[in-house]
Image (spheres, rainbow, N blue to C red):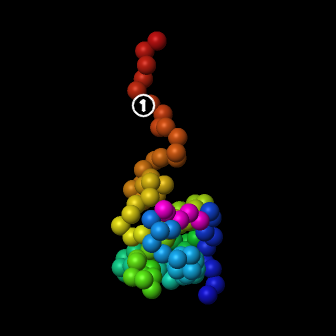
Amino acid sequence: MTPKFPLGNIILSDKTLLAVSAEECDLAIKKHECGDWGELDEYTRAQNDECLARSGYGAYVLSQHRTSSGVTLSVYTSGDRFETVVFVTGELPISMLPEMFDLPWTGRPMPSTETQEV
């Protein structure tokens, strides 16, 4: 299998570390990196493929893989390819919220839109 995009820093959620083996995590990450989207619907698969066809950057990429123990892992790579988060499906790590819901959040407080009188 040939990697199709960079993963950046890899982060495993606490729940993932407790639920599955390192080998199962590695396998899910390798499949994800090579464009095997696992148990996703056709719409999400098409979005992933379209993103990679454009340039590989811009939108997040998501996959889901069932482990031999029956746990389903989600693997999420950010649109800027700075990080890949592996988590148990159903869990939603905080670092993914801004991009998944198109929030203009960069980890810093948003500037106030209120004007102050002087």
In the picture, the quarter occupied by the N terminus is bottom right
Q: Point out residue 98 in the picture as x, y percentages from the top left corner.
A: 44, 53
- 17 vs 3, left or right, is left
Q: Residue at x 46, y 12 (%)?
A: 118
Question: Can the viewer see residue 56 in this picture?
Answer: yes
Q: Residue at x 45, y 65 (%)?
A: 15
- Is-magenta flag for residue 13? yes
Residue indicated by mark 1: 113
Pick the residue in front: 2 or 68. Answer: 68
**Residue at far top of view:** 118
Question: Can the viewer see residue 35 in this picture?
Answer: no
- Is-magenta flag for residue 43? no
Q: Residue at x 47, y 37 (%)?
A: 110
Task: Write the start and end of the magenta stretch as one range.
Answer: 10-14
Vertical position of residue 95 compared to residue 67: above or below: above
Vertical position of residue 8 compared to residue 105: above or below: below
Pick the residue in front: 9 or 35. Answer: 9
Instruction: Assess disc 1: are there few (<14), some (14-19) or many (≥20) residues with their C-alpha within 10 Å of its C-alpha.
Output: few
Vertical position of residue 24 compared to residue 61: above or below: below
Q: Point out residue 68 in the picture as x, y percentages from the top left corner.
A: 45, 86
Q: Quadrant of residue 91 in the image?
A: bottom left
Q: Residue at x 58, y 70 (%)?
A: 56
Pick the residue in front: 21 or 73. Answer: 21
The amino acid marked with disc number 1 is Thr
Pick the residue in front: 94 or 78. Answer: 94
Find numbered disc 1 in the image and state the secondary structure of the residue it sits on: loop
Total marks shown come to: 1
